[in-house]
Image: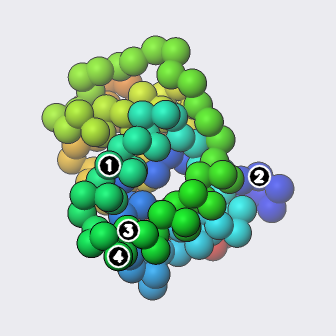
């Protein structure tokens, strides 16, 4: 990877969740890389709402209060992507359709721990999908 060239991605909600709750995991490294401006993360309104909805429901109130500030800081570094065209349904999970729409409109790679829900979009739409571990390997090159 060229030093001046940042990897452009959309992070699936499972990556955000694990990255904010398990610092020493591949997802934690990705969140740290985002915070350090080592990759460019793209979001849409729907993706932001999905992040907030899932985190606020799955985390305890106390943990959510702590994570909210970090998430807001990360989102302030994100590139906003307007959704001009929707490819729904492209996944069995409606939340993943939001990630697919953002990735397709921004022409970026999806990073997810859940490869199976993105198989059809990968095959039919040409969506590029990597695991968190694969992204960490790219970041180290």
N-terminal label among 2 and 3:
2
**CA gap, disc 2 and disc 3:** 33 Å
**CA gap, disc 4 and disc 1:** 16 Å
Q: Is residue 130 left or right of residue 88?
A: right
User: Dot 3, crowdedness within 10 Å: few (<14), some or many (≥20)?
Assistant: some
Give the image location of residue 137, x and y in percent.
53, 69
Give the image location of residue 141, x and y in percent.
66, 69
Residue at 39 percent across and 18 percent down: it is 86
SS at mark 4 in the image = helix
Q: Is residue 117 left or right of residue 52?
A: left
SS at mark 2 in the image = loop
Residue 22: image quadrant is: bottom left
User: Circles 4 and 3: CB distance less than 8 Å?
Assistant: yes
Residue pointed to by mark 4: 62
N-terminal label among 3 and 1:
1
User: Dot 2, crowdedness within 10 Å: few (<14), some or many (≥20)?
Assistant: few
Residue pointed to by mark 1: 53
N-terminal label among 1 and 2:
2
* Quadrant (top left/top right/bottom left/bottom right) for the N terminus: bottom right
**CA gap, disc 4 and disc 3:** 5 Å
Residue 137 visible in the displayed image: no
User: Circles 3 and 1: CB distance less than 8 Å?
Assistant: no
Residue 94 visible in the displayed image: yes
User: Dot 4, crowdedness within 10 Å: few (<14), some or many (≥20)?
Assistant: few
SS at mark 3 in the image = helix
User: Dot 1, crowdedness within 10 Å: few (<14), some or many (≥20)?
Assistant: few
**CA gap, disc 3 and disc 1:** 11 Å
- Comparing marks 4 and 1, which lies closer to the viewer? 4
């Amino acid at each position: 990877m060229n030093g001046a060239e940042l990897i452009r991605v959309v992070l699936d909600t499972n990556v955000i969740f694990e990255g904010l709750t398990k610092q020493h995991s591949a997802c934690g490294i990705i969140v740290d890389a985002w915070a350090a401006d080592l990759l460019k993360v793209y979001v849409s309104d729907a993706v932001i709402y999905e992040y907030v909805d899932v985190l606020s429901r799955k985390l305890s109130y106390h943990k959510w209060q702590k994570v909210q500030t970090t998430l807001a800081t990360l989102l302030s570094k994100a590139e906003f992507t307007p959704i001009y065209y929707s490819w729904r349904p492209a996944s069995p999970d409606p939340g993943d359709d939001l990630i697919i729409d953002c990735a397709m409109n921004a022409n970026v790679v999806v990073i997810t721990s859940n490869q199976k829900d993105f198989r059809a979009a990968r095959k039919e739409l040409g969506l590029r999908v990597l695991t968190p571990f694969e992204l960490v390997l790219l970041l180290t090159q």
